[in-house]
Image (cartoon, rainbow, N blue to C red):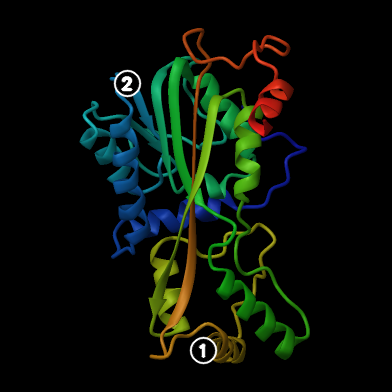
Amino acid sequence: MRTDSSTPIIFDRQLLRARLQRLQNQDICDFLQLRTAEDLTDRLLIIKRPFERSLDLSLLMTDYSAAVCASGRSKPLTANLISGNVIADEEKLPFREGSFDLIVSGLSLQWINDLPGALQQIRHLLAPDGFFIACLIGGLSLIELRTVFAQAEEEITGGVSPRVSPFVEIKDLGHLLQRAGFALPVTDVDSFSIRYNSLVDLMLDLKKMGAGNILSRRSRKPMRRDVILRASEIYAERFSDQDGRIRASFEIMWLAGWAPHVSQQQPAKPGSGQFSLEKSINRLEK
């Protein structure tokens, strides 16, 4: 399923690929990957199913494949933009329908231009009663950073350039899973803060994550030094603790769903209830 002409191109996927390739031979910042991979293991351990054929669509890191193995399953096939068993774009996956029993995705779906289309693809790649689980960066992540950059740039240049990628909101994910055809969809959020000595340290960590600005309509000009200095001042004024360190919020959203199967629990048909709610309430009142 390809991104069609009606899909807005929000992210520059070629730029994302280039940045991830550069990171392969560099020291990376991986605390988000390690945290979410450990969480993935815990979530998979709850499910007592073998999942013999699995696919890992995570970017760059091998932690998510290791998480699948740590849960007692076989090592999954890996596919992403730059490495793995198959070099593939999540927006046009080259696999047959029903090829996998389990598909995992770690911190990659937030950079998809056509997220509804990608979820539909993943749903069709699952065999009946197959399971999909993914995590992605949520809408409240780096809210402080977005706020201080916007204020600093407005004060100094009189306008605001897009500097930080937009993220999907948790309230939309359940609907997207249902729209893609998943049964029993579930979503939840892991919210936490990381403290840094300075704004520059935070920006360096983001660069080492490959999480720089990849917006297709990003400003082509480097950020001015005076804007960064002013943003640092605002950050320290508004989002610092008593020891002077600043806080950066992160939100990791989890989504999961099953490919439909007759064995799954089904909602009751309208009018099939055997007990009257009105009578139950009257009985409680008495």
Which residue is under mark 1?
236
| Position of the N terminus by quadrant | top right
Residue 155 versus residue 94 in the image, above or below = below
Q: Position of residue 263 (x, y in %)?
A: 47, 9
Residue 184 versus residue 21 in the image, above or below = above
Residue 244 versus residue 66 in the image, above or below = below
Q: Nearer the viewer, residue 85 or 247?
A: 247
Circles 2, 1 touching at the beta carbon (< 8 Å): no
Residue drawn at x 61%, y 22% as measured from the top left: 181
Q: Position of residue 129 (x, y in %)?
A: 45, 16
Q: How many marks?
A: 2
Q: Secondary structure at mark 2?
A: loop
Relative side of 77 to 219, left or right: left
Quarter of the rendering containing residue 133: top left
Quarter of the rendering containing residue 80: top left
Q: Amino acid at mark 1?
A: Ala
Relative side of 16 to 8, left or right: left
Q: In this rendering, does residue 89 appear at all?
A: yes
Which residue is under mark 2?
51
Q: Nearer the viewer, residue 50 or 25?
A: 50
Q: Secondary structure at mark 1?
A: helix
Residue drawn at x 29%, y 18% as measured from the top left: 52
Q: Nearer the viewer, residue 48 or 233?
A: 48
**Of callouts 2 and 1, the N-terminal one:** 2
